[in-house]
Amino acid sequence: MVRGISLFSGGLDSMLAVCMLREQGIAMEAVVFRSPFFDIRQARKSAAHIDVKLHVLDFTQDILGLVRCPPHGFGGAMNPCIDCHAAMIRRAGEFMRAHGYDFVSTGEVLNQRPMSQNRKSLDVVAESSGLTGYLLRPLSAQLLDPTVPETDGRVDRSRLGSVSGRNRQAQLELVRRYGITEFPSPAGGCLLTEKGYCRKLRDLFDHTDGLPDVADVELMKFSRQFRLPEGGRIIVGRNRTDNQALKAQAARGRMILHTVNVPGPTAAVVGSAGLTEGDIRLTAGILASYGDRGTLTEVTVRVHPASDAPYEITVAPLERNTYTQWML
Ligand code: SF4
């Protein structure tokens, strides 16, 4: 029996690639790469919808290394798509060899994305992943060079697609053909393409030697963040859910601060170095400013250092235009 393993983001094209190969009797399974930047819940949902077995591989260290130094550069934000794609395909290739699949497939469509899916990029990806000849793009296969499984007859090339470009008409016809009733809209799902998120991530990389700690990278998803004048980096909760999550960071050895005598936000410190005395007072002033302090002119803030006992300080709220300049 011919067996294929398909890269599977959970987007429509990745679903169609599996269905198209399965239509000719090939036993297909799928693989998704988990990282702090890519939410795999859609992949799980789409895999369940088309009833394909989904393997989850951790990709965190691979993608952090590529964000630090992408050989083929970034897309519109901090997305090293060409290298990321090649690395995922290389990992899928290792998985293919280890588990006896006949080829790796993807849902890539020729010329769908100007940067990462033109013919040259598809060739670069195949070459740098070391999978030339065993990397099948079934949706556009008839427009590309035949792969080894097509040449030796394990895959019937005449039953593969010739889809090209951004028009989704051909995909929608395949949706009907394969009875797919649920699929996500084409929009991304990768945080590395979001400019607001990448501002915070860029700051983290710029202030870290080597690769940042994964726990710090996970914190970049919080929206209200500051780089303070003495170098400290803090996250300030926006709502109860944020504050609870940031408070829970104390149990993981992270410095946190919160207001005591008025309702107010919690702050967590990014990195293990903690804060200088100056940055602690500024953080307390920011928390006091966001706090619900009524007519109080001073607010008490409890500081929980990473390893020492907690203590309290009392500060005046900082003026908003003093700290907005530190916002990321
Ligand atoms: S969008 Fe994100 S996950 Fe997809 S190839 Fe680009 S960097 Fe990788």
Image: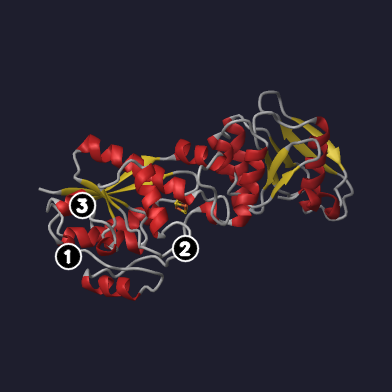
Q: CA distance from mark 2 to mark 3?
A: 29 Å
Q: Is residue 326 above or below residue 115?
A: above
* Tag 3 residue: 28
> Please, what secondary structure does the residue beneath circle 3 have?
strand
Q: Position of residue 30 (x, y in %)?
A: 28, 50
Q: At 85% from the left edge and 50% from the top edge, which residue is drawn?
A: 322
Would residue 27 be visible to someone looking at this image? no
Label 1 or label 3, whichever comes before in sequence order: 3
Q: Nearer the viewer, mark 1 or mark 3?
A: 1
Question: How packed is label 3: few (under 14 Cα within 10 Å), some, or many (20 or more)?
Answer: many
Q: Is residue 253 above or below residue 193?
A: above
Q: CA distance from mark 1 to mark 3?
A: 16 Å
How many labels, in total? 3
| Residue 197, label in figure | none
Label 2 or label 1, whichever comes before in sequence order: 2
* Tag 2 residue: 114
Q: CA distance from mark 2 to mark 1?
A: 26 Å
Residue 12 falls in which quadrant of the image?
A: bottom left
* Tag 1 residue: 159
Q: Is 100 left, or right, of 78 in this rendering? A: left
Would residue 96 be visible to someone looking at this image? yes
